Every structure is written in C-alpha cells, then in structure tokens.
Amino acid sequence: MFRKIKIFVLAVATFGNVNAQKTKINSGERPKLVVGLVVDQMRWDYLYRFEKKFGKGGFQRLLGEGYSLNNVHIPYIPTVTAIGHTTIYTGSVPSIHGIAGNDWQDKETGKDVYCTADDDMKPVGTDDKKLGSHSPKNLWSTTVTDQLMLASNFRSKVVGVSLKDRASILPAGHNPTGAFWFDDSSGNFITSSYYMKELPKWVKDFNAQKVPEKLLANGWQTVLPISEYTESTEDNVAWEKPVGFADDPVFPYNNLLADYATKKGVIKTTPFGNTLTLKFAESALDNYALGKSAETDFLAINLASTDYVGHSYGPNSIEVEDTYIRLDRDLATFFKMLDEKVGKNNYLLFLSADHGGAHAEGFLKANKILGGFFDDGMEKNLGEELEKKYANSKIINGIDNYQIYLNQSLIKEKKLDEEAIKTTIIDKLNKDPRVLYAVDLKKIGSSAIPEPIKTRAINGYNWQRSGDIQIVSHDGMLPNYAKKGTTHSVWNSYDSHIPLIFMGWGIKHGESNKEYNMTDIAPTVSALLHIEFPSGNIGNPITEVIGR
C-alpha cells in the first residue's frame, strides 16, 4: 500500500519538476504580496450558477483575467474547515500534517480535542479563554507561509484573518506576524499570547469603530428584487434555519442589530461577516504596510460567512444566493483596493474553498433525490448490539467526522478483543441500508472499496487522532444534527469539488479541466515564489499556471 503511494508521488513530482524547468525558476522575481482567499463552503458550481448576477469586478474579473482550474478536488475525508485550510497551505493531508478534523478525540483519554485549542496560551483582546486560548501547536507540517518566512530570513510579513480561529491560525503557520479572529463574546477581533502580548493599536482602533453594528444597522434585505433570485427555491421552506432570533427564514431580516446586541456571533450568519473580514484585512494591509517592502508579504484571508449561511439555509436558498452576490461586490471593492495600494501587477492572488456543501435533506426529498440521515439512532443501535455480545454498551466513545471512536481505555481495562469488536460493528453497519461502506481504518488499504474513496480515506486517516472505523454513507446522507440547513464532510463531488483561480502577478489568462488536487495549491504558490515546498507537501506545481 505505502510503496504504491510513494511511487505515484515520485512519478508525478518528477513530471512536475521536468516541466518546471520551462519557468523562470531561477529569476528570483517575486510579487510584492500574495493574497490567499479561501471562501468557506464554496462549491465550484457557484461560479457559474450565479454568474449572471455577478458584476465585472469580482468573480467575473477572476474568471476573465485569471487562470481557472475547473477540476480540483479534495483528496481526503473528512472534508471540513480545519483540514481544508491546513491542506491548502501545507500541500499535505491529515495523515501527515496532523489536523484530522475541526476536532477529534484523544485516543488515550477519550476527551475531545479542538484543532487549535492551547491551554498554555492566554487570550489577547478578550477574557474568554475558550475563544482566545489558541495556537498552531497541533499542526505538524510547515505551511507555504512558513516557507516564505524561512526564505526571507523572517523579513516577510504574514497575517492571517478570519471570523474563525482555526481558519486564521492554520494558514498563517507557526511564526507569522499575526493571526486574528472574531470574538463572539465582544464583537472584536482578537488574538492569543502565542502571537503577541497585547493587541496592536490599529486592531484596538478598528474594534473601537464598531463596524459590525454599522453593517447590521439596516438589517438584511435582498440586494436585488426577490423575484430575480431564479437560481433558488422559494423564500420560506421547511428545511431552512433562520438567522438570529427570527421566527422564520424569510426576508427581510430587520432585527439583526437587536439580535447582535444579545449575541455577537449573529453577524457570522449574514453576508456582512464577509464585509467585516475584508475591511479588517484591508486595515491589516495598511498598518503592517504589506506589499511595501523589498520582501514578499502574505495575507491569508478566510471568508467564513458563506459557511455559516450555507449551514443554516442550504445551497438552494435565496440567502445563499444573496450572500454570493454581495460577496462578489465586496471582492470587486477589495480587488480595486489592492490595485490602488499594492499595484495591479504587483500582487499574486488565489481564490479557493476549504470544502463544498451538500443539498439540504428536505430539498432532496422534495425533488425525489436520495437523501436522509445516516447516523439517526446508529450509536444507540450499535450499543445494544455490543451489550448483547460483550455485556457492555459503552465500548463506543462517539461518532465524529463519519468515524467511530472506540473506548480504548475500557477495552484495555476489560481485556476485550478489539478486533472482534470492530468486526461486530462493521458487520452491523454493512447491513444498514444507509451505509455504503464501513471499514477498519487500519485495514483500509486491503479493503474492497473503490477509488477515489479508498485513497481519500487513507489520506484522511491519522492513526494518532482519527477514529477506528470509517463510515461511508450513501450519497446525500447527512449527519443527524443537520435536520435543517446542511453540512459537509464526505468524498462526494458536492463536498469535494472546489474552485481554484489564480490571478495577478505572473498569471496568464485561461482555464483547464485537467484533474488537480487541493494539495497542488501550496507547491504552485511555492514555485511561483521560488521557495521550498512545505515540509509535508505531497502536491505538485500546476504547470499550466506557472508556465509562462
């Protein structure tokens, strides 16, 4: 199994290196700034589904000036935010870079571990330890941002920005200039003592402007007449979950400012969370003078509100469509700002996504397409089976990331046969009509599972942090918690097919339908910058992008 993987990577890497000789690899030229834009939960098809509603300066500019890769997939499962951002910036996979989910269970203690939580760090800018005590300590590989710092002897500046802690921290790497995220308790951008002892004055000044209140002051109405949202279902359907304290998922949402006064995080589930993020990113660019020195700087931005809106309403909602129309306008403003402050030909920008999103279960049912909830009653049923055979129903610690975690401490204490337990669970699961495959993750290399599912499960399996049994559900099956709205995590195209567009410095216009992986982003940026690939990288430079 492992021998085959090594041969494949070597072969592709050799091909990439041969083609790379056609580029100006020794020229030493670099852009003044690299901007990484990761649009959370953006399915590839949104580029064209909402195309007629986009103006010329945002997504249309990316497609018209940049190089678009139309067949880029995520090469692992589970497809979640923390892994997506880590993979984009490391060129690696969970098996190697160590980020096995947004959270996972500690194999020894059975306790939940959040991907960036670090109790040794203190919150900076807030008193909330849960929201502020974070670092990249669980990240095992270097990022392209780390490699840029190393290449410049730490003269480059690297800044991560997101509403989410993990989507700021993991892309920024191990030793950035700063990483900042949104504090749900105060409505401010914050950081941790891993990066600095106190917030810079410019961040305090930005927070003092109360930008969220200004953005929410007029509520959320559709930016176009609601009758023009022809790519979406009607405004009020049973499978949508409204934002804030609204009774129904129906426009207009007039009470957002009052909702925000009670719950600051409400701005996340509106398009204005993206606006806020880009305004903060511009402030970071100004105050750190990014793109103004002799060294290349890096601004890593996650636009998270697309994910929050998607989770609440599902891909076919007017809310999602309106969010992307507004994001398109925000991007146009942001690109124009970069043109003016950095120079149109002086920055390299890429836009991608950390994952896609499934159709809501109710939407699928209404349209006669297979769907359902794969884990509804699953843990209870398995517990009853284990009670019968082993006189213990507590053998399963939990089901997370479509993986079953066994109670290893209990198994050792009771001297139970772990292999027999796994066989019992797998046999039970494979009789479940909702399950396509269930497999022992330690034996997945020899299992009768087709590609690309097998390789994606292998890439996603981190033996120290992942579960013990992988569940692959039938198409359209969601976890039980997603009764309304939607979620993501699986190998299917709706979760794994992501956009990837490069634009700006050194990028020719064009598009390709050749197959690429998310892991190819970091080495492509590295090749363009003439720096070493990240330490755990398994991807390859996209020669169509770097060849010129």
Image (tube, grey):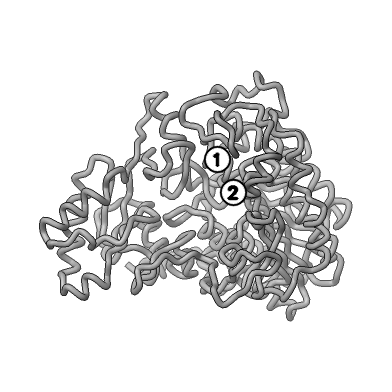
Can you identify the residue that label 2 sits on?
40
Question: Which residue corresponds to the image point at 71% horizontal and 59% vertical from the top-left?
Answer: 189
Q: Position of residue 37 (x, y in %)?
A: 67, 53
What residue is drawn where x is 56% and y is 34%? 242
In percent of width and height, residue 499 lies at 59, 46
Q: Which image quarter: residue 137?
A: bottom right
Q: Amino acid at mark 1?
A: Gly
For label 1, the SS is helix
Q: Which mark is residue 151?
A: none
Return the x and y of residue 186 as percentages of the image width and height.
Answer: 68, 56
Give the residue at mark 1. 310
Pair 1/2: label in front: 1
Helix, strand or loop under label 2: loop
Which residue is drawn at the image coordinates 65% and 57% (left, top)? 183
Horizontally, residue 92 falls left or right of residue 29, namely left
Along the line of sight, the residue nearer the viewer: 328 or 163: 163
